[in-house]
Amino acid sequence: MSGTTLGQLGARGYVMTDLRMSFDPSVGSVFEADYEGSRDAIRIASALWTSRGGRVSIDESGPISKATAVFSGNRNPNNPEQASFVPPATASTEADANGEVPTERFEIRSARVEVSIFYLPMVEGEAKAWAAAFGSGATTALYRKQLEDAAKDGSLPPFSLDTFPVAKSVYAMLARGQDTFPTTRISLSRVRTYSATYSLPTVIDAFPKAYRTASLVQAFNIPAFTARALPADPPAEDTPQYCVWAWYRDDHSQSYVPKNNHVEEHTSWVFGAIDAQVFRII
């Protein structure tokens, strides 16, 4: 039974009677607030709480209406029904007109992938040196073709393998049926959580873009600690022809969580040699 009387409700027509805090790894801080007030005041307030990302339940079975509102994310711990709150020292350019700032988590991962042996930097570098040594008509594509054709036919390529030691290793691999090589691919992932009322969600590009590392850091407000751990561009001799080292979006997904009226957004970028003729490089 409620201990609140109509005379204790004040100018707003309702009062907060309890506030509980917890932490959910998926959304951050969770605030569960209990309110008591007049029926009309609670109904009006619940519409406001919902618009600010709260999940509200109401009990109107007695003379004093009761409501429980659940808020999560970057909230003012003294008054979680306010729009999302960030202390001045951590204010972000991602804040929307209501002051809401998404909760973000960044992860750097490396995964094993199989790539063509001709994609490896050492092979790419020697292919360029081979083309330069043989002059007109010699290309990196011809370097590859002569090695592949020789291995397939069981003959030697029409150039000295002793002069080009990487080609000698590649030829031996091709001869035993190996045309790929294990390496690692680095990816950066961002997980953002914000209320359904947040006005600055990520908008997907209609055409693919690739970001140089400095551009990626600036465009997506990547924290300095994470940015320092991103790989440096390999040297020019290890860069495939017509390519630049950049990050391209590998995945983007968005899910809505009715439980707390929040959206969870996943975006990942992969680092690699990007064809500048196919992607718009930022």
Image: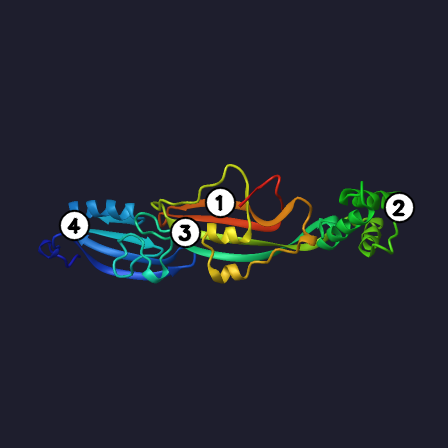
Say few, some or many: other residues with alpha carbon within 10 Å of mark 2 (under 14 / 14 to 19 / 20 or more): few
Say few, some or many: other residues with alpha carbon within 10 Å of mark 4 (under 14 / 14 to 19 / 20 or more): few
| Circles 3, 2 touching at the beta carbon (< 8 Å) | no
From the viewer's perspective, tell me whether residue 224 is left or right of residue 35: right
The three-letter amino acid code for the residue at tag 4 is Gly
- Counting residues from the N terminus, which is met first, the one under dot 1 or under dot 4? 4
User: How much space separates mark 2 and mark 1, taking CA atoms?
Assistant: 51 Å
The three-letter amino acid code for the residue at tag 2 is Pro
The three-letter amino acid code for the residue at tag 1 is Ser
Q: Where residue 253 is drawn, which disc sits there?
A: 1
| Circles 2, 1 touching at the beta carbon (< 8 Å) | no
Mark 2 sits on what residue? 158
The three-letter amino acid code for the residue at tag 3 is Thr
Colouring mode (rainbow / by chain / secondary structure / one colour): rainbow
- Counting residues from the N terminus, which is met first, the one under dot 2 or under dot 1? 2
User: How much space separates mark 4 and mark 2, taking CA atoms?
Assistant: 94 Å
Question: Looking at the image, which is closer to me, 91 or 20?
Answer: 91
Say few, some or many: other residues with alpha carbon within 10 Å of mark 3 (under 14 / 14 to 19 / 20 or more): many
User: How much space separates mark 4 and mark 3, taking CA atoms?
Assistant: 37 Å
Question: Looking at the image, which is closer to me, 239 or 23?
Answer: 239
Element type at mark 3: strand
Say few, some or many: other residues with alpha carbon within 10 Å of mark 1 (under 14 / 14 to 19 / 20 or more): few
User: How much space separates mark 3 and mark 2, taking CA atoms?
Assistant: 59 Å
Question: Looking at the image, which is closer to me, 18 or 88?
Answer: 88
In which quadrant of the rendered image does the N terminus lie?
A: bottom left
